[in-house]
Amino acid sequence: MKPNISDGSDRKVIFFHAPQSRSGGTLALLEELSADYELHLLDFKKGEQRQPAYLAINPMGKVPAILHRDVLVAEQPAVFLYLAELYPEARLAPLIGDPRRGPYLRWLVYYGSSFEPAVVDRSQKREPAPPMTSPYGTWDDVLNTIHAQLARGPYLLGDRFTAADVLWGIALHWTTLFNLVPETPDIRAYIERVIMRPAMQRAAARDAEFVAQQAA
Ligand SMILES: N[C@@H](CCC(=O)N[C@@H](CS)C(=O)NCC(=O)O)C(=O)O
């Protein structure tokens, strides 16, 4: 018989993380979920993510990645969906039957399938593909989509804070810092609302410790 979900023993995940990287969002989500996790730090400066030991775990050589019962989950939207459902008592994932389920999935997947490619094109000063071919349409389409959703706030899905806000709050935090996404008052207020949460602050403090640890 499978262990009950309330029995924490089978929910422990191994989390592969590099400080100040995309895996910072997963670190924050694990803190928000009060999840049971064992953290494995990778040192990008030493190229540890491209060495055989890690490639045997995640052939993409990327973070974030988690192992749960020896099964690999990688790619941020997949990792977020997986973890939020592994810890349902944190109520960060609207379940099937909840009208917020559709927008929840849409915003998590939109992050990986449209926002990231748009930001990368933007940061590389690359001309996007023609709008009908580009996964995100145009850069303005992306900004308008985000603004329209945040105007309905306080969170992406309205009143309810979800795992999608962990992903988007941190992504907007970094992309505004790098002047990729313009910091409008709505976006700034949303970022503050998300990153000032105690679990998010805890994750940021842990990450700063990891940076210091690797610099030593
Ligand atoms: N599509 C992946 C991208 C992950 C990614 O590019 N992570 C970077 C860190 S910001 C990485 O691991 N880079 C190391 C490398 O490629 O060697 C996701 O969303 O999880």
Image (tube, rainbow, N blue to C red):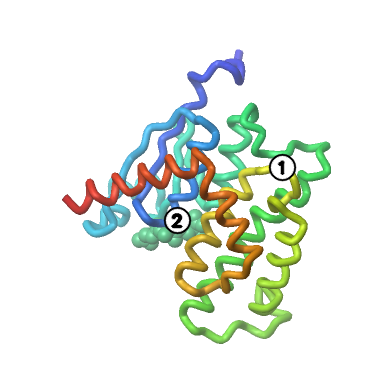
Q: Which residue is mark 1?
A: 160
> Badge 2: how crowded within 10 Å, few (<14), some, or many (20+)?
some
Mark in front: 2 vs 1: 1
* Quarter where residue 99 is shown: top right
How far, Cα to Cα, is label 2 from label 1? 24 Å
> Would you say 147 lies left or right of 61 here?
right
Residue 172: x and y in percent read 55, 62
**Amino acid type at mark 1:** Arg
Q: Residue at x 62, y 50 (%)?
A: 165
Q: Residue at (64%, 27%) from the top-left corner?
A: 89
The one nearer the camera, 51 or 118, is 118
Question: Which image quarter holds the N terminus?
Answer: top right
Report whether the residue tagged 2 is closer than 8 Å to ligand 1: yes
Q: Quadrant of residue 163?
A: top right
> What is the number of callouts on the image?
2
Q: Amino acid at mark 2?
A: Arg
What residue would you read off at disc 2? 22
When the figure is inspected, residue 109 is found, relative to residue 29, above or below; the finding is: below
